[in-house]
Image: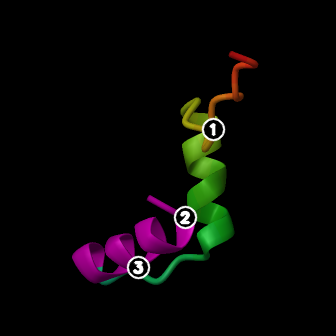
Amino acid sequence: TTIKELHESYISSTSTNISSITLKRHLHKNNIYGRIGAKKPF
């Protein structure tokens, strides 16, 4: 899920308009980061 999808989902479920940056800030504050695992050489 992307931050854009989370943002749209949040707005539709709560009817509260917040910035996607604010949403990302709160996710990071709760130690939720969007990371992809590194490719292994084998």
* Residue 11, picture quadrant: bottom left
| Residue 35 belongs to magenta span | no
| Residue 13 belongs to magenta span | yes
Work out whether 9 lies above or below 15. Answer: above
- Per the model, the C-alpha gap separating discs 2 and 1 is 14 Å
Amino acid under disc 2: Ile
Classify residue 27 as left or right of residue 38: left
Q: Which residue is drawn at 68% across and 16% down?
A: 42
Work out whether 21 lies above or below 26. Answer: below
Query: Which residue reaches farthest top?
Result: 42
Classify residue 37 as left or right of residue 1: right
Amino acid under disc 3: Glu
Q: Which residue is drawn at 56% across and 61% down?
A: 23
Work out whether 26 lies above or below 42. Answer: below
Q: How crowded is mark 1: few (under 14 residues within 10 Å), some or many (20 or more)?
A: few
Work out whether 17 lies above or below 13. Answer: below
User: Circle 3 sits on which residue?
Assistant: 8
Of the numbered discs 3 and 1, the one sitting upstream in the chain is 3
- State the extent of the magenta-drawn residues as a range: 1-14
Q: Magenta: predominant secondary structure element? A: helix
- Per the model, the C-alpha gap separating discs 3 and 1 is 22 Å
- Which element type, helix, strand or loop, lies under badge 1? loop
Give the x, y percent position of residue 40: 70, 20
Of the numbered discs 2 and 1, the one sitting upstream in the chain is 2
Amino acid under disc 1: Ile
User: Circle 2 sits on which residue?
Assistant: 3
Viewer-nearest of labels 2 and 1?
Answer: 1
| Front position in the image: 5 or 42 | 42
- Per the model, the C-alpha gap separating discs 2 and 3 is 9 Å
**Badge number at residue 36:** 1
Query: Which residue reaches farthest front?
Result: 42
